[in-house]
Image (cartoon, helix red, strand yellow):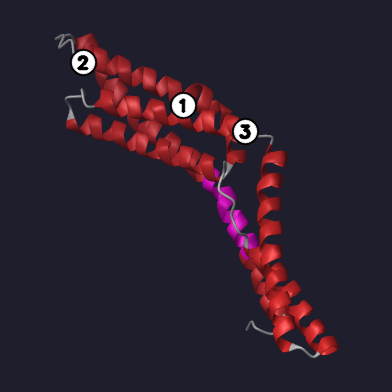
Amino acid sequence: MPKKEFTVTGNVISGIIGGLIFFLLLFFLRSFPFALIMAILIFIAGLIIFRKNKTEINFHLEGIKEEELRKTVKEGLDKVKEMRVISLKIKDKNVREKVDDIFNIVEKIFDDFKKDPADIKTSRQFLNYYLDSTIKIIKKYIEISDQNINSETVRLTLSRTERLLDSIKIAFEKQLSHLLQNDILDLDSEVEVLEKTLKMEGLGD
């Protein structure tokens, strides 16, 4: 089950509610200990509520089932692990490093899926075509290069494949950057909300 996380917005709202409860109880009941305990309980309850809602809303709105998320990530990472083992057969060190770089990026993409399941929906092309095609090309490259055939045609094909690996790396880097853009926007929104709240409370600049 995805890890439930506290949000900055949820923390701020819970803190505001807890603070209001504290001052109201203190004003009407004149009991500092009771007001403080109730404020803390309300604050904790607010954190739990907002944390719970975040997880449920994400999966509901994104249309990604937990089982689908686990299956997608597992299958993708299994492919990467398989290719890391196979890539050890590549004799050329530079080519092997290119392949490792590609799959380092792919692992980061699947890590992003675990943190933000909605990104799976926008990555169907990556999942259904680019990754499998890349793996197929690398396997064929290894298969042909292992035969040690001294042919101009073979050399040109292998050289062309090696150049293609650079393009594949760039494409996957762009894919990762695109996925992380949502996280950047989310962070900007959280920061903006917190800054406005701090100013409203007279705690900002």
Query: In the picture provided, is 125 more to the left or to the right than 170?
Result: right
Q: Residues within 10 Å of mark 3 (few under 14, many from 20)?
A: few
**Camera-nearest label, 2 or 1:** 1
Label 1 vs 3, first from the N-terminus: 1
Query: In the picture provided, is 205 more to the left or to the right than 73?
Result: right
Compared to residue 75, the image places residue 190 above or below, namely: below
Secondary structure found at label 2: helix
Residue 75 is marked as: 1
**Residue 174 at least partly seen:** no
Q: Residues within 10 Å of mark 2 (few under 14, many from 20)?
A: some
Q: Where, by quadrant of the figure, is residue 42 drawn?
A: bottom right
Q: Residues within 10 Å of mark 1 (few under 14, many from 20)?
A: few
x 32%, y 25%: residue: 83
Residue placed under numbered mark 3 in the picture: 121
x 55%, y 26%: residue: 125
Residue interval drawn in magenta:
178-190
**Disc 2 to disc 1, how far (Cα)?**
27 Å
**Residue type at mark 1?**
Glu
**Residue type at mark 2?**
Ser
The quarter in which the N terminus is drawn is top right
Front residue of this view, candidates 2 and 131? 2
x 61%, y 66%: residue: 191
Residue placed under numbered mark 2 in the picture: 145
| Secondary structure that dominates the magenta span | helix
The quarter in which the C terminus is drawn is bottom right
Front residue of this view, candidates 171 and 37? 37
Label 2 vs 1, first from the N-terminus: 1
Query: In the picture provided, is 27 more to the left or to the right than 83?
Result: right
Query: In the picture provided, is 104 more to the left or to the right than 66?
Result: left
**Residue type at mark 3?**
Lys
